[in-house]
Image (cartoon, grey):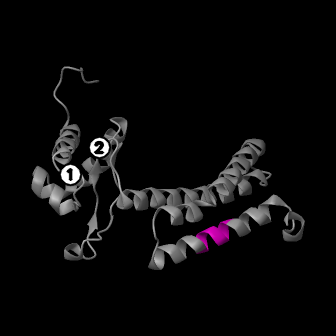
Amino acid sequence: MSRKRDDAPSQEEQDTIDVLMWLRHNVGRELSYADIARGTGIPARRLRRAVPKARMAAHQLGNRLEQFMHSRDPLKRGARVTRFHTCGQGDEFGARDALLACRKAVAYMGDMHRACAFEAHNPNSLDQEAFGQMAAAAEGSIRTFSGVERLGSKIVKNHGTMRRQAERIADLEAQIAELTSGESPAASA
């Protein structure tokens, strides 16, 4: 049985609306899940579903709800926080968020490449050719995005563990790209 458009929103939809409305009054502030729960009155168990949906809805509206990252505020040392920005706003924290999203995407792209390359060479695969094309597309994407750390260093200073991990990921991805391209390192130089 489908709902009519005139029906009231579901609890999950209402929670998402409440989160977005509350975020509009807290633009640019570092907010933890506890802050959002206190401000909206939504219990944590429901909030865990509402926040990702609010992130998608914010994107559709041209706004940005950043991923949860460690706060830079000394008073909130170690707390995981997010921030809401309306269209046209952003700063170093937002740039860190974008770089984090890029790194995650590159890591997932590496997983996609490995899985598709395996299936492309698997004689029992459903469609070796299709998986080969997906592996090639993933490899091209990895090459395109392999400079994320270099570009990011121009935008924001990276420190500590995150930078070392990103460099290690980039090195491993470059090695994977070399191994899968079929060229020797001397031939590509």
Q: Secondary structure at mark 1?
A: helix
Q: Main secondary structure of the magenta part?
A: helix
Instruction: List the residue tagged with mark 2.
Output: 86
The residue drawn where x is 31% and y is 41% is 58
Q: What residue does disc 1 label? A: 46
Earlier-in-chain disc, 1 versus 2: 1
Q: Pick the residue in front: 57 or 157.
A: 157
- Three-letter amino acid code at disc 2? Thr
Apparent side of residue 166 relative to residue 121 in the rendered image (left or right): left
Label 1 crowding class (10 Å Cα cut-off): few <14, some 14-19, many 20+? some
* Residue name at image x 29 percent, y 58 percent: 82
Q: Secondary structure at mark 2?
A: loop
Q: Nearer the viewer, residue 56 or 31?
A: 31
Residue 131 placement, left or right of 181? left
Residue under the point 12% across and 50% down: 40
Taking the magenta stretch, the answer to whether it contains residue 179 is: no
Identify the image quadrant of the C terminus.
bottom right
Q: CA distance from mark 1 to mark 2?
A: 24 Å
Q: Which residues are magenta?
A: 168-173
Position of the N terminus, as image quadrant, is top left
